Amino acid sequence: MKVLIIEDDHRIATDLRRMLKEAGITESRIESTQEGALTSIIDFEPDLVIYDYCPNVSEHNFNLAKLMVSRHIAFIIITQNKDEKLFASLSAFKPIAYFTKPLDVNALRYTVSKLHEERTLAPVGTEIIKGHLYHYIFVRKESKFHKVDSSDILFLEGKGNYVTIHCIANKFVLRVSLKKCEDHLSSGSFIKIHRNYLVNKQHIDSFHYDSNVLNIGSRTLPIGRTYKHLLLEELPLFR
């Protein structure tokens, strides 16, 4: 997991980086200016941002929050200001945690460690590429690509710029569009049932055409109205 620290106090930033290493996170970057932070969010592509919120630069705060939300980046806010109105306004940014200075380092370490554990179990990738005859794909985790047989994929769930690939035994979270995944998977095996869902035909257990739902194992997925006709066209139906 990659973490960006936005903090203009060098001592605090260094302490935060040390805390990250103790939590098992070795990839981190420190930015002391709002402009540098905006650049790092784009080129460093952090999974988490620890953000020293400065109430006096509201325009920069808005731009940073907007960018992080658009890229689905989790962020933790730390601030010296204990004003209740400020806390209420920060809640609109939907941070995963909010800490006031002086920092409770143990509480912050616990929050970061839990997020790191979740990201390790559902690794974030950055790319998905085609395999021979579309029978498999390679999913990137850090610098290594892992082979995933397409027959083991149950369905893909898209949320913004992220896709969760639900497999029989595990799942992968990728920073990629559902459209790109759809382009790299065989249209003979997969069918789009909703703008956010692409399913493996062989794993469909049942679907209720009038109720607009489809079942794969214990999961119930929605069928988008504009995609209903595909089920009738693509599946071998006997009426």
Image (tube, rainbow, N blue to C red):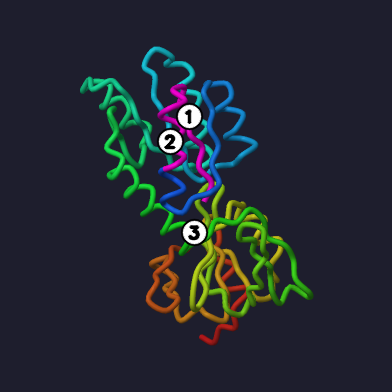
Q: Amino acid at mark 3?
A: Gly
Q: Residue at x 57, y 27 (%)?
A: 38
Residue in the image at 28% along x and 20% along y: 81
Q: Are marks 2 and 1 in contact (CB under 8 Å)?
A: yes
What is the CA distance from the residue labelled 2 to the residue labelled 1? 6 Å
- Which residue reaches farthest bottom? 238
Q: State the residue position of label 3.
A: 224
Instruction: Look at the picture and state if 104 lies above or below 109.
Output: above
Q: Count residues near mark 1 (Cα–Cα under 10 Å), then give few for <14, some for 14-19, many for 20+.
A: many
Closer to us: 65 or 12: 12
First in sequence: mark 3 vs mark 2? 2
The residue type indicated by label 1 comes to Ile
Residue type (three-letter) at the residue carrying disc 2 = Ile
Residue 228: image x %, image y %? 53, 65
Residue at image position (42%, 58%) is 118
Q: Which mark is residue 50?
A: 2
What whole-number distance in Å separates the C-alpha atoms at marks 1 and 3? 41 Å
Task: Answer left or right for 126 relative to 76.
Answer: right
Q: Dot 3: what SS? A: loop
- Asked whether, in this view, residue 45 is left or right of residue 83, the answer is right
Residue at the location (74% across, 73% down)?
134
Q: Nearer the viewer, residue 190 or 97?
A: 97
Q: Specify few, some or many for label 2: CA neighbours under 10 Å numbering under 14, 14-19, or 20 or more.
A: many
**Magenta region:** 1-18
C-alpha distance separating marks 3 and 2: 38 Å
Label number found at residue 102: none
Secondary structure of the residue carrying tag 2 is: strand
Q: Secondary structure at mark 1?
A: strand
Of the numbered discs 1 and 3, the one sitting upstream in the chain is 1
Number of the label disc, if any, that sits on residue 6: 1
Residue 176 horizontal/vertical position (percent): 61, 52
